[in-house]
Image (cartoon, rainbow, N blue to C red):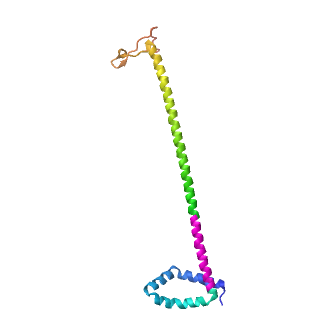
Amino acid sequence: MLSLNSLMTLAAWAIGLLGVGGAIAAAAAAIILGPTVVIAIVQPILARILSCTRCVVAAVFVLAMVGFYWLGHHQAAKECRADQLEAQLRNEKFDTAQALKAQADEKQRADDIEREARAQHDQDQAYIERLKAKPACALDDSDLDAGRLRIAPRSGGAKPARNAK
């Protein structure tokens, strides 16, 4: 009489030997030979397995383990997918927050540049107004001579440049 351990070992060897080839051969026999021949071949095997209580217990055990594995595998896949979606959503929220922060920084930088440009413009305008108030600094068309700037001597007289040639 075979023990349950020996039966499981034999079943594992049989599945390994038959493997996918056995499954393909069984499917081909069912299609080619028709159900009558398949029933004639399978019925004695099933009758012998069903008459053996240990074989039925082993078959139920194996089927239960396969079912539990299948259910557990699908549950784990669902949890993994949920974790992936959660991480993707978290990353998208972070990216959105970073984009909003960058947009705010860009607006602040543009406002700073505009404020500095306006201050420089006001400074330049004030300087131009001070220059216009001095008659010696006024520049008009008569100061230009054939595309070259003609500089009038100062009222106190111009000082010659050092090392002038």
- Depth check, front residue: 66 or 155: 66
Q: Is residue 76 magenta?
A: yes
Q: How many marks?
A: 0
Q: Position of residue 45 (x, y in %)?
A: 55, 89
Extreme-left residue of the structure = 146
Residue at 49% across, 26% down: 120
Please tell me whether the stretch drawn in magenta is mainly helix, strand or loop.
helix
User: Magenta stretch: residue 156 in it?
Assistant: no
Q: Nearer the viewer, residue 149 or 136?
A: 136
Quarter of the image holding residue 79? bottom right
Start and end of the magenta stretch? Answer: 56-78
Above or below, comparing residue 112 to residue 77 in the picture: above
Q: Quadrant of residue 84?
A: bottom right
Frontmost residue, 100 versus 155: 100
The residue shown at (48%, 20%) is 127
Task: Estimate the x, y position of residue 100 in percent, counting from the top left.
Answer: 53, 44
Q: Measuring 58% from the left and 82% from the top, which residue is drawn there? A: 13
